[in-house]
Image (spheres, rainbow, N blue to C red):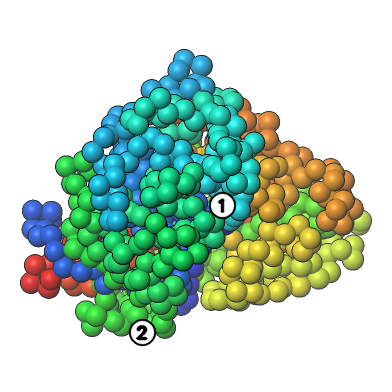
Amino acid sequence: MRRYLKVLALVGVLGLVAAACGGDEEGAATGPTAQTGATGAEEEIQPGGTLQLAQLGDVSDAWDPQKSYYSVNWSYYRCCLLRTLMSYNGKPVAEGGSELFPDIAAAQPEVSADGLTWTFTLKTDIYYSPPFEDVAVTSGDIVRAIEREADPDASVNGYPFYYSPIEGFDDCGSGCGSNGKTISGLETPDDATLIVHLTHPAGETPFLFALPASAPIPPDAEDEPLGAAEGHTKDYGLFMVATGPYMFAGTEALDFSLPPDEQEPISSMNVGKSYQLVRNPSWDPATDELRPAYVDGINITVGGDNNDLYNKIIAGEIDAVVDGIVPPQLLRQFSTDPALQPQLQIWPTDGVRYLEFNLAEPPFDDIHVRKAVNLAIDKAGMRLFRGGELVGNIAGHIITDGLTGNLLVDYDPYATPNSAGDVTAAQAEMAQSKYDSDGDGVCDDPVCDGALAITDEGDPYPDQAALITENLAPLGITLDVKAFERTTMYNKCLDPASHMGMCLAPGWFKDFPDAYTFGPPLFGSEAIYPSCCNRSLIGASPELLAEAGYEVTDLPSADEAMDACVALPAGDERVSCWADIDRLLMEEFVPFVPYVYDNTIDLLSERIVNYSFDQDSGLAAWDQLAIAPEAQ
């Protein structure tokens, strides 16, 4: 489920320097705590040393690129392990961080006049890490990866829906890539050419070949259809062969000549405990303009106490916490002391946090109820529980401004004074609901009593749930709040059979720099459980609703409106189309209460002399962090 945002629970941080995180018209942060080059300029950089990272939770799906749908994994793939036909430069927006650059491809793809045929030409001098150091990447290796993504058994929890426009992709199905099953829309006239045929124009096509699922898979010694991934439907991540500047230590010992069930996984991959990345001797920086790869290696430890990990940063034992929560006292200290500010980095991401309604579950099947909740929620209070103004800007609509060309910067159809909620306006909207029989602005139907609300059990969600409950009380709505571990929470919110009324803790981060990634994955009828992430059930079929036990028999669909945007090429018209979709969702569907656009906050050790925010992953660009020579 992706690209779910990491939790930032900065409870109690009040009155922190609001100016520390501003934004220019392109969406890049400005100010003393939001700057590239944490403690030095690039001319001071000397490659070397080992970066020490810690993360509270493990990566998802054991590093399998066809399954993994999580920002932390994707940050490691882009910076370090996997090259793709197209990729990003690991920079913020103002430095081209949302632009698509050739990586394995030799140039931008050529596209036919009708938008149905895309041709990629590959570089011919990119090689795999050991034990395939003598094997060059070819176009067939890209096909192999896409065929694995088309196999629902290999891509479970992944994002195969993005590749549906490729001719024959959806038809390949289980076992795709084996037993003669191939994707008809992928053509390889030679090793350096990949031709992609689409069933309909799709302007997002080049972005699909920057996603990790499209990273090449090498052929194996037995020339099996899925190459090194053959027989590893569930665990290819533990046998993954790199193309980036780094590989997992011990990759060279992989033996693909053995039957898959006799192969030993990479020795340094201690799932749930630690991982070790070392330089890939096959990587040639002359072929790679996107990754400086300053450090010699990266050690990653998993688990521990959040506050203890940040104390280790202060002590110089580790350099950064990948998915951590900067403790309030440290955020206050580092944001207000000019001498410490270079170690604190705050950047706006392309992510939003929101409350989500199930449009089939009473009382939220009534649009007036959903609008009333939007007006009642104290968004400023919600943000305060996350840490205040430093953690992000108040959200007035769904798709982030960076993806809608800032066309909606001032758009908020449910704005309230100081973003604190407006009971009077909310009750006026509730009075129009079928669940308020006497029109007094308070629900008087039993369906408003104990509506199921599912949330995350970790901070700050208990406090946020209490605030939401308080906000809804004047509307006559009470919630039955159930809290779960985050993965379980998402699974329950996703399952229509759970009959949740509201999901209180989701966040969504773009998959690539196009508003498409906020469209079909969240609101498309084909993205309803188990395929993806449409928890609001927009576009659900009567059959699905009946099977899940809903009395509602018909829900509106946004598919046709979104299809019109999908068909447009990249450019102003496409951006404007998605802005119109955002307005449509906010006014005629109302599936969300968006409340904050997330910032990323990184606290770094004194060893780090260069920092770059990777707009693609919404995290630091690990290949661009450098270590002071005296600390190497």
The relative height of residue 482 versus residue 258 in the rendered view (above or below) is below
Quadrant the C terminus occupies: bottom left
Q: Confirm or deny contact between disc 2 and disc 1 (CB under 8 A).
A: no
35 lies left or right of 490: left
Apparent side of residue 525 relative to residue 626 in the rendered image (left or right): right
- Could you tell me which residue is drawn at 47 percent across and 27 percent down? 187
**Residue 343 occupies quadrant:** bottom left
Can see residue 244? no
What is the crowding at mark 2: few (fewer than 14 residues within 10 Å), some, or many (at least 20)?
Answer: few
Residue at 66 percent of width and 63 percent of height: 491
Residue at the farthest right position: 437
User: Toward the viewer: 248 or 485?
Assistant: 248
**Viewer-proximal residue among 242 and 93:** 242
Q: Residue at x 13, y 54 (%)?
A: 42
Question: Is 151 on the left-hand or right-hand side of 25?
Answer: right
- Depth check, mark 2 against mark 1: the one in front is 1
Residue 468, by quadrant, is bottom right
| Residue carrying label 1 | 155
- Of the 4 image quadrants, the one containing the N terminus is bottom right
Using the numbered discs, state the Cα–Cα distance from disc 2 to disc 1 in whole angstroms. 36 Å
Residue 204 in the image: state x and y as whole percent. 48, 34
SS of the residue at dot 2? Answer: helix
Q: Is residue 471 left or right of residue 615?
A: right
Say which mark, if any, is on residue 359.
none
Earlier along the polypeptide chain: callout 2 or callout 1?
1
Q: Position of residue 474 (x, y in %)?
A: 75, 66
Per the image, the residue denoted by label 2 is: 308
Q: Amino acid at mark 1?
A: Ser
Number of labelled discs?
Answer: 2
Q: Which amino acid, mark 2?
A: Asp
Secondary-structure class at tag 1: loop
